[in-house]
Amino acid sequence: MATKKKSSTRKTSVYRLNAPAEPGLDLRALVSPRYKDREGFTTTPVDHQGVTGLLVTGSIARERAAWCDPLAELTGIDVQVAGRTSSGMLLVRVDWSVYAVTYGMGHHMIDPARLDLGFGLRFALRSLDQDAVSLVRRHLMDARGRTDENSTTRGGNLRDLGNEWVGSIVSKITGRAIDLPLTHTVDGSRVLGVSCTDTSITLPLGLSPQQFMHDLRVIEDACTQPAPLPGLESLARVRSLRRRGGTVLVQELDAELDRRLGDPGVPGVALNLPGECAAFAADVRAVRVTRGSRAVDVDDVDTLDIEDIRQFCCDRPEGRRLQALRDVRVQLFSDESCTEPLSPPVAGHRWITAEVLSGAAHHFYWQGSWYEIGAEFVEALKRDITEVLHRPYKVTLPAWPKGKDEGWFNEEAAGQPDYDLFDKKTVRTKTFRGGGLEICDLLGPEGQLIMVKKADSGSSGLSHLFAQARTAIEALRYDVEVREQFLARVAELRPDLRPEDVLATPTVVLAIRLKYGIPITAASLFAFSQVSLLQTDVALQGMGAKVEVVPIHA
């Protein structure tokens, strides 16, 4: 039997830290305080054949593993197994930075405030082969708050792993790297597999001190490249600032949002429907906003105003408003008396979206976290949204005066020749029980599915509208019972329309009235509404539908 050749590398996790690589730097300052002087952990300076840094090792021992008690309860047997968690971390000075190389649970010993967030993805965008990506995890910036993870065993192009890239934040990407002069690939016989998250890189590193330091310098050189590799540029457009609570940037952004919460006249703050509430929006009959014993009830999501939430924090001293907003809870109910909850109580700050411009940087607060969007993305977003908004349409809609509700407007529009009212004419099936599913508000002259929304309070109403459009088309396309009930109603009201006129290539008309009837442009729509609209357009096109946006004037 052939003897297995001893490997010269070992798969290792690497983090880069926000600290100057200066000889006088005390590396102990980069260690999480809870591990510096913890019993069972030691810190030892290292200066060995070119490797200079600090070694932190230790373990946490338990007389009984945490799983012993539940297993004993299930079996009636006294389970006695010791538990031990081991951790190792080597902090190393390289030419320009300090790196943390971790083993076991060693990553827990890094002070989170010191992590260079974005390091892992920066390396990925400058080292991965665009045609050999095997896994992508991304978060969509829309009302659904959805996280997608797509993978393939063979590896392929990014487009093979999903095409809904508008406004998505990538948190993990795995694949094969291009030719990097690392120890693992020096003989040309092995490919280099790399897994990258926002904060880390996992890849094989050389085992000898010389090979190890050489590989870290290769990583450092790759990260200094000025631009992502061709085909990977789209992943660099949106950067999450999640877990940056200790950084100066997030502290400054939080302070600005806190200031705006105290001044209703300051623009750039609006409502946004949280992802965990989007699925219930169509069935809402009441919304309750609470903080402690104080409560405010609102008729539904459409009438919920930002002031209904901000009133719970605006009277707080500056610097304490955002924290007060985090203590607010907003819950959706299916009955007017707020006794039948639809959603869990959601923290108030997750209902707020904000935009902050700072020089060339464009920052957004969404779903309780900050994001940074590059100038290239903002320009691309403006260009794409302008194309959607300028598409021709054939429907005509009346004016919507201030003070009139959506029901009044729909009846006015349905009074036109060849327009029919479908508002509140819900379809009820085994899937859509209870409040049922509202396919559209109006049926247009050529079978257009017209969905109407007033968006006075920011992006919340539009998030509801876009979610309704997706749900309606998905149901008509995939649910036979929904399709049959809807077509039966169309035949009853409009016998001149054939089923194929309505559903062969359905036209979804998003009819929108902004605050005081201002025009719908790339400038007047909140950035997250632009992202959600583009994602809706992509999703509906994928289901064979066309999207038209029609402004409603006051």
Image: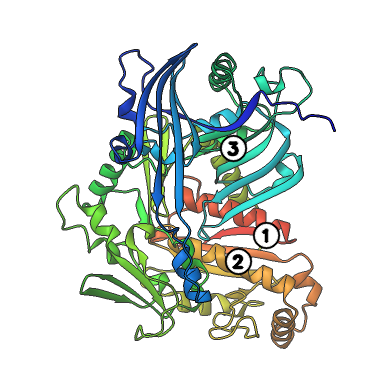
Q: Decide if residue 25 is on the left or right side of residue 471.
A: left
Front residue of this view, candidates 201 and 142: 201
| Residue in the picture at 19% in, 47% down | 319
Q: Which residue is mark 3?
A: 235
The residue drawn where x is 52% and y is 35% is 200
Given the image, on which type of amino acid does mark 1 rest?
Answer: Leu
Alpha carbons under labels 3 and 1: distance apart: 23 Å
User: For numbered disc 2, what is the local secondary structure?
Assistant: helix
Q: Are marks 2 and 1 in contact (CB under 8 Å)?
A: yes
Q: Earlier in the sequence, mark 2 or mark 1?
A: 2
Residue 217 percent across, percent down from the top left: 54, 16
- Residue pushed farthest bottom? 492
Whether tag 2 and tag 3 are in contact, CB under 8 A, the answer is: no
N-terminal of the pair, mark 3 or mark 1, is 3
Give the residue pinned by disc 2.
469
Would residue 392 be seen by someone viewing this image from the given angle?
no
Instruction: Tell me the number on the disc at residue 394.
Output: none
Which of the 4 image quadrants contains residue 13? top right
Residue placed at 16% from the left, 56% from the top? 316
- Label 1, on which residue? 540
- The Cα atoms of the two marked residues, 2 and 3, are separated by 27 Å
